[in-house]
Amino acid sequence: MTHNIALIGGDGIGPDVTAEAVKVVRAAGVDIDTTDFDLGGQRFLRDGEVLSDGTLDELRAFDCILLGAVGTPEVPPGVIERGLLLKMRFELDLYINQRPFAGTAPGGDTPHEFVVIRENTEGMYAGEGGSLRTGTPHEVATQGSVNTRMGVERCIRYAFELAADRERKHLTLVHKTNVLTFSGDLWERTFNEVAAEYPQVDTAYNHVDAACIYFVQDPHRYDVIVTDNLFGDILTDLGGAVSGGIGLASSANLNPARTGPSMFEPVHGSAPDITGQNKANPTAAILSAALMLDFLDEGAAADRIRAACAEPVTGSTTDVGDTIATRVRN
Ligand code: IPM
Ligand code: MN
């Protein structure tokens, strides 16, 4: 079966790492038909388009979207992030951001696998707030966190389903209920209510600041973590840093209801400082493509790709892609 994939290489190193991901998917024997979409900071500078509603509608027709990295120093911060990445997450209802890790505790040798489920459409990212009297001594700025019962519950339910399918069957809620009492109460009550439907899953709760210590010192306590949008953003950069670096961190932006395409992207950015030098590590993009194959029901190929990435590879972007592609073929 042919899968129709929209490719958004993006800016900087994005197109290069995406090309290696496509190479490895094909080496794994998965039949994909790709269509390039020229989007990102460079496109915006050329003709002002970030992501029009027309382009968004074109993307809806695909099975999945594979994205490299977007953003360029000449475009003010926020334009591409909000207008492209967040617009896709919100409009395509990609309400789960799934990020797998392999953390090693200090002195430990075997990396420990765990996964963060980040709510991807609400919280601080909803853009609630505003400013008044800007630039005067009396200026005011507010930024609110939006949490709906529906949004929180569907995310928590997805995390319980995932935990129930895993060997260890353990789920940790991460929040800051001691200070964020309103949203924390909604998250905690919803978590406890859904937990009653999954007696086979063991549960725990950590405040987000404590979770930062455990990510570094004791990642073994985690199996699946569920958390809100902003905590998940920050924690997953930390997760990348303690799991071999951001060059290995992959992510899936999922619409589990499958009412539209899901989107897969490495956690890292466009790295303009090393653009065009063939030295970006494509592994995060390749592992993101493996997450895409999981979602396309090509789990065996995805497992082969992950196995091929497990042994260290060094070299240029294309060398790493070639080596992993060769391992996958054999
Ligand atoms: C991520 C990124 C994005 C986020 C930015 C680029 C908007 O940091 O995917 O984690 O904050 O979600
Ligand atoms: Mn981030």
Image (cartoon, rainbow, N blue to C red):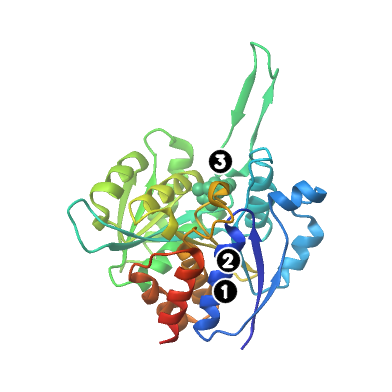
Asked which secondary structure carries label 3, the reply is helix
Q: In this view, does 327 lie above or below 228?
A: below
Q: Which amino acid does label 2 sit on?
A: Thr
The residue identified by callout 1 is 22
Q: In which quarter of the image is the N terminus?
A: bottom right
The label number, if any, that marks residue 124 in the structure image: 3
The residue identified by callout 2 is 18
Which quadrant of the view contains residue 184? top left
Q: Residue 100: x percent and y percent?
A: 40, 62
Task: Tell me which label, 3 or 2, sits earlier in the chain.
Answer: 2
Choose mark 3 or mark 1, whichever is in front.
1
Task: Tell me which label, 3 or 1, sits earlier in the chain.
Answer: 1
The label number, if any, that marks residue 80 in the structure image: none
Give how far apart the Cα atoms at labels 2 and 1 are: 6 Å
Q: Is residue 198 above or below residue 105?
A: below
Determine the residue positioned at 54% across, 56% down: 277
Is residue 260 among what the camera can see? no
